Image (cartoon, rainbow, N blue to C red):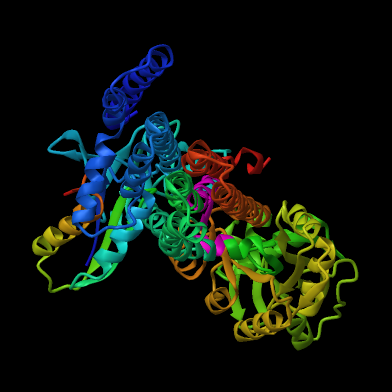
Amino acid sequence: MTRKQKKTLIRILISLVLLVAVWITDGFVTLQPAYLLLFLYGIPYLVIGYDVLRKAVLNIMHGQLFDENFLMAVATLGAVGTGEYREAVAVMLFYQVGELFQSYAVGKSRKSITGLMNIRPDYANIERNGALVQVDPEEISVGDTIIVKPGERIPLDGIILEGKTSVDTSALTGESVPRTLHAGDDVISGCVNESGLIKVKVTKPFDDSTVAKILDLVENSSSKKAKAENFITRFAKVYTPVVVCSAVLLAVLPPLVLRGDAVVWKNWIQRALTFLVISCPCALVISVPLSFFGGIGGASKCGILVKGGNYMEALAKTGIVVFDKTGTLTRGVFHVTALHPDTVSENALIELAAIAEYYSDHPIAISVKEAYGKDIDVSRITSAEEIAGKGVKAVIDGREVYVGNDKMMDKIGAEWHPCHKSAMGTTIHVTVGNTYAGHLIISDEVKPDAVAAVRDLQKENIRLVMLTGDTRAVGEAVAEQLGIGGVFTNLLPGDKVHKVEGLIDNKENNKTLAFVGDGINDAPALSRADVGIAMGAIGSDAAIEAADVVLMDDQPTKIHTAIAISKNTVKLVKENIIFSLGVKLIVLILGALGIAGMWWAVFADVGVAVIAILNATRALHIKKYSVK
Amino acid sequence: MKKVYALNDLDCAVCAQKMQDAIAKLDGVLDAEVSFIKQKLTIETADDIDIDDLMKKVKKTIRKVEPDCEVVM
């Protein structure tokens, strides 16, 4: 509790004791004269309400007519005027109890949300004049060497110069398995160094570092308001004046029409006073943004950055998810997935291919060498020559070796045949001294959790579409493996935007379209979709800029998690709006009819606010979404 | 220029909204956000403005809406 909250608590207790004391005395003894009673009830009233009265006066002088304090002051003083002393004190007391709860609950959830996002590094260790000193990460420049000890947060992006360690990326990605890193590997700021001491050469200034970018994004997420938030803001502006005006009408009109006496007037004024107590829209104004803030905070804990409440709303209504295949459902990294030798052994086939590709940097060559995995004896290569778009020609151990695609085989007139066993991937043929040796298949791997991701989304009745620049055979094979119905293949980057536009035009009205890309070459489609989701964005600035939702790691199952968190958040917002407005409306009606009194009115004001706030904090409960 | 200030004792969400509207109308202010949840004032101003002078006006505006609320400089 803050000092102010403690002070309020003490005032509440004192006032409560005094109220009870006066109440009991009042019950046993007839206090005379009448103003003695007023004086006695006046003490607990002033103890608990003096700050409200003070603010009410100040705000009137500043022209703030519909201020909460002013309305409470009028309501309670009005109760005093109509002889309801006890109610006046009790209402003020309950109002303050509610306000205290409210400020405590908001403070608490603010803390837990900011705690979730607490990835800001406090300091960096750097050697200055032979001694290790701690400095502000902003003072470090590019090229400096910093030292990160075990248990410390990595303050800046860089490359490991020395040391080996495991790094906990969970604060950024939600992934709990640590990554092992060695000298030469990139490290990302915001992660926690777990096991070893590392020396890191800084590659980016703090302001451009991953952690600064993420913090900036999360901090600014509240400026992109959800429709529900804008509705509440507009609603709050008219709600108070309308209720206050109704209160005035309620106090004046019925007694005038009924030509009532003093008793009738008093009765209707009391009814009007209950209106004033209910006239603050606090429950809504606090709980709706708090829910979105909590939802965004909870999502970021799962490694999902949502750039605003509006995108949460859009995600919750997702009807179509469009994937750009490479990098989202597949790894986007090529591997040798099959060896089909005709005339040599499997080992000989991959060995020949690897040696022939030794000097090439082509992605295919790299994957072949990776698959071979052994050191290559360069002395076996007499000559090597790359033939653009076709493959390589090399002389190994004195024999002429060709490694290449169908076109290469046709060019040299080899007796080759297409692969009959595997539809997926690219076929690379190998010939040795004019004999066809066989072929290997290189393909992009489907991510381990892609099947689960597709299944989860289909369970929610979300239509899935896959776009790819790859050939029809490859694209359809991947789609079939994953169980995706809609596939469009052979697309150029510009075609993808057109496809997205076409799908947006044809979707159901109240549903949204989400486009998932890896941030490479798909910025136009990301921005054209209702929600652009970038995957595996850790360290990729372009993706973080272009997308509305950023998945820090590369697991496609996180798409479903993001949608589930958004749905939950939006559900809480709806609950709060319906509940708060419903209770207020009912109590207003009952108050006008003279059934609900001041007590109900206080509940409809602060009681409802506290309940709505507690409900909103449920947006933070993200345990159930954490990836198995 | 974009500046962020912490706010102490901002107790009322409706007031936060009123402050935001009033600050946004001040001369030289391009955009303003008063977040009740974060207890923060984010203010975007024209570049050629006297920030100290503006902040005096901002403080006055805030005090008008909620007398106890203070800007932490």
- Residue A624 is situated, as x and y percent measured from the top left of the image, at 66, 40
Q: Please state, as top left, top right, bottom left or bottom right, where the C terminus of chain A lies in the image.
A: top right
* Left or right for A251, reference A426: left
Q: Residue at x 79, y 86 (%)?
A: A410
Residue A583 vs residue A393, the one in the foreground: A583
Q: Which residues are magenta?
A: A290-312
The answer to which quarter of the image holds residue A397 is: bottom right
Residue A428 vs residue A490, the one in the foreground: A490
* Left or right for A184, reference A480: left
The answer to which quarter of the image holds residue B50 is: bottom left
Does residue B63 belong to the magenta stretch? no
Q: Please state, as top left, top right, bottom left or bottom right, where the N terminus of chain A lies in the image.
A: top left
Q: Is residue A202 above or below residue A343?
A: above
- Residue B60 is situated, as x and y percent measured from the top left of the image, at 15, 57
Q: Residue at x 68, y 65 (%)?
A: A318
Residue A451 vs residue A368, the one in the foreground: A451
Residue A97 seen in this snapshot: yes
The answer to which quarter of the image holds residue A244 is: bottom left
Direction right: furthest residue: A420
Residue A262 vs residue A78, the one in the foreground: A262
* Left or right for A320, reference A549: right
Does residue A306 belong to the magenta stretch? yes
Q: Is residue A251 above or below residue A7?
A: below
Q: Main secondary structure of the magenta part?
A: helix
Residue A123 seen in this snapshot: no
